[in-house]
Amino acid sequence: MLIDKVYLSRKIYFASGHRYHIDDWTDEKNKEVFGPCNNPHGHGHNYELEVTIVGPVDQKTGMVINLTDLDKILKDSVMSPLDHRFLNYEVDYFKKTVPTTENIAIFCFNEIKKLLPIEIDLHKVKLYENSDLFVEYYGENYDFKNKKI
């Protein structure tokens, strides 16, 4: 019997502070490129992360994944390292990577993917910095030319 694959999405919320800054640049260059986001004291956001996975529906449970299991994966991969953290100083990945919305989405994608069961794929993450700024990341296998994975 053919088992259909289903896309399942879950939202989580976290708050983080950050500063856009490249150490190799002068203060003037950082201010020119990043503007107020280069404030030495940083600034913060209440992020909304939408995670979409895809996998077969289990014939017994009727689920792609138990939401309790997915919630634990999201807590371990995103909430624990990012929630109420100043990213530049408290998250190793962002000590050398500017914590832009784009880079935070990539971080989340890679960390979530590590913890998913092998039969489930991470389709995308969509990270909202606020209501009018968000990014979507489909992983490194996304084919931009043909707009497909």
Image (tube, rainbow, N blue to C red):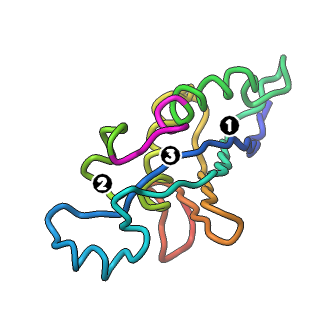
Q: Which residue appears farthest toward the front when viewing the image?
A: 41
Which numbered dot is residue 120? none
Q: Earlier in the sequence, mark 1 or mark 3?
A: 1
The span from disc 1 to disc 2 (Cα, nearest Å) is 31 Å
Residue 121 image position (x, y, % from top left): 58, 40
Which amino acid type is shown beneath numbered disc 1? Gly
As displayed, is residue 41 above or below residue 74? below
Q: Residue at x 68, y 72 (%)?
A: 132
Q: Which residue is under mark 3? A: 109
The residues colored magenta run: 80-88
User: Per the image, is 82 magenta?
Assistant: yes
Q: Amino acid at mark 3?
A: Phe
Q: For marks 1 and 2, give the one nearer the viewer.
A: 2
Residue 56 or 17: which is nearer the viewer?
Answer: 17
Query: In the rendered image, which quarter contains the N terminus?
Result: top right
Foreground tag (1 vs 3): 3
Residue hosting label 1:
55
Pinpoint residue 40: horizontal percent, then vertical percent: 33, 60
Q: Within 10 angstroms of label 1, few (less than 14), some, or many (20 or more) residues? A: many
Using residue 124 as the reference point, say whether residue 3 is left or right of it. right
Q: Looking at the picture, how far across and down is residue 98, in whole percent?
A: 34, 58
Occupied quadrant, residue 134: bottom right
Identified at 31% across, 82% down, the residue is 32
Residue 125 vertical position relative to residue 70 in the rendered view, above or below: below
